[in-house]
Amino acid sequence: MKQKSKSLIIIGVLFLVSALMPIILKKYHLSMLTEIMIFALYAVSYNLLLGYAGLLSFGHAVFFGMGAFMTAIALVNIPGLSLWNAILISLVTTIFTSIILGSLLLRHKGSYFALLTLAFNSLFYAVATKWREVTGGDDGLAIMRPELNLGFTSISMTSLTNFYYLTMIVIGAAIIFCWYFTHTAMGKTVLLMRENEERMKFLGYNINISRLILFTFTGTMAGLAGIFYAFHFKFVSIWAISVDMTTAVLLMVFVGGTKVYWGPILGAFVYIILQNYLSDITARWPLFMGLIFVIMVLYVPGGLSGIITSIWQRFFVKKNHNAGKASTAEVVTS
Amino acid sequence: MSDYINIQNIHKDFSGLKVLAGVDFKVREKESHAVIGPNGAGKTTLFNIISGKLKSSSGSVVFKGQDISGKPPHILNRRGLSRSFQITNVFQELNVFDNILSGVRSRYGRRYHFFKNPYHDRNICEKTESIIDEVGLTSAKDQPASSLSYGQQRALEIGITLSTEPELILLDEPTAGMTREETEQAIRMIDRVTTGRTLIIIEHDMEVVFSLADTISVLHYGTILVSGTPEEIRNNQLVKDAYLGEE
């Protein structure tokens, strides 16, 4: 109970702080914060695969891009499509894609799994590039944000502030649900998958089903991030479904750290800010991003969250041994 | 219909290498049955076949009147069969509680639930605690499996095997690598936790075998040399020549 109310307080405070941001921040920074939230969900969904299940995928952009492209394609081709229906269509498509890809990848592990996901990512990228009539090819697709229909009233999404609040609520809820997910039976099953798939089988777990559920869930969450990415930029280019987009999420997760839930959120924050400022200074910003990635992997394998956690433990958690049980719920590895 | 599990003419070839060449034996309900035999006799292969890890080349395993040969391990586990491993096979980074919990919640159908937190289910938690207590790991409950001593890891291995509340338990050399003292403790524990259940155990240690088993089968070069009570096995000339005599 104590743990539960603590979590609720943290969520409440974060909600209030986020809700005040449009008053505090300038438009440019508010836009950046919206972007951070979207990529935070993308990174969190990726870490459920990498950090929690120990599955290294090079194809996560397939789902992100699928969400983004389906949103754009639906809005361009179906006049008068509502915001909710655009989200619904894109989500359903992403779920189907995840189930199909997931079932093809089930039997493969380790580097085979990684390479196959890379191959699928390249395949989807090729389709997005070549199928110009639908995806716009290199030109991409430009869209308008439809207004938000709440039944009794409609809210225009043209203003950034309104769109920011929508993102905060929907993406925020998704991030919280992913966190909740790590405490559910299925979330614990994901940890078993990382630790010892062989043993799980002899305890009544169907490995294929466990993997498929996880793959579909993380794919869907990445798709939701992709949908909001399309709404945010009002434009979708083939970059959204490229291997670069997969590398971006890999970088965010590694910089933030895979060991704690909020690591990838921190990673997304740092990534988006760095990208924005570095790209102002130099056109060669990916080079610096790459350097940071190399340094992180070599010298800080726990990521920024790892550094913060160890500092925290050193200075603030000394006296209380019973706190161990509470913190194991937060730290994935223990 | 007193045959609870009936192993019929099991053959297994590994690309030409004959490991099992027609294994037959039966175990009655609630009996403790030991499979003994020299290294390389095919004991673990036999276990792998019964538990669904490997498919036999021919022959069948009949469990409670149903042919279970070739069924995957998770299905067999749900039907009440659980096994341990000769080489400790636990969830290393998880603590003892979570290790045992994994099987308990599986038994309660909480494998893939998206909303329920297993820690909040009283039945599941109590069952987990009681199994931890049975295998004597209560003091190490919050420790990660990787930090346990060897003996404790072996106890955890048995605890995980018990966690799905099986009717039929297969233990693969549960005391391998233990000291004399640890072995004695382990025998007492195994004897206690398997009461009222059917047990098939692979063992090298004759003391363990003779103190635990109601019946014994001797596996020798892929076939059962003889099956019988401990007394019969001890006095059997074939067994003495092939196996016991060497000790």
Image (cartoon, rainbow, N blue to C red):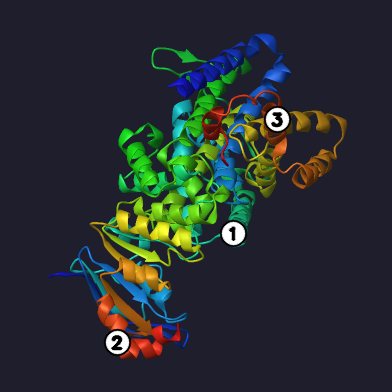
Q: How many marks?
A: 3
Label 2 sits on a secondary structure element that is loop
Q: Is residue B240 left or right of residue A307?
A: left
Which residue, given by chain and number where applicable, does mark 2 sit on? B236
Label 1 sits on a secondary structure element that is helix
Q: Quadrant of the C terminus of chain B?
A: bottom left
Q: Residue at x 69, y 36 (%)?
A: A306
Give the class, few, some or many, for how many residues have Cα within 10 Å of label 1's Cα (few <14, many ≥20). few
What is the chain identity of the residue bearing mark 2? B
Q: Position of residue A242 (x, y in %)?
A: 66, 47
Report the amino acid beneath label 3: Ile
Closer to the camera: disc 2 or disc 3? 2
Q: Position of residue A9 (x, y in %)?
A: 52, 16
Residue A82, visible in the rendered structure: no
Closer to the camera: disc 1 or disc 2? 2
Q: Position of residue B39 (x, y in %)?
A: 47, 80
Which residue, given by chain and number where applicable, does mark 3 sit on? A308
Task: Specify the quadrant of the image occupied by residue A222.
Answer: top right
Report the amino acid beneath label 1: Gly
Cα–Cα span, label 1 and label 3: 30 Å
Q: Is residue A189 left or right of residue A253?
A: left
User: Nearer the N terminus, badge 1 or badge 3?
Assistant: 1
Q: Quadrant of the N terminus of chain B?
A: bottom left
- Residues at discs 2 and 3 both on one chain: no
Which label was assigned to residue A110? 1
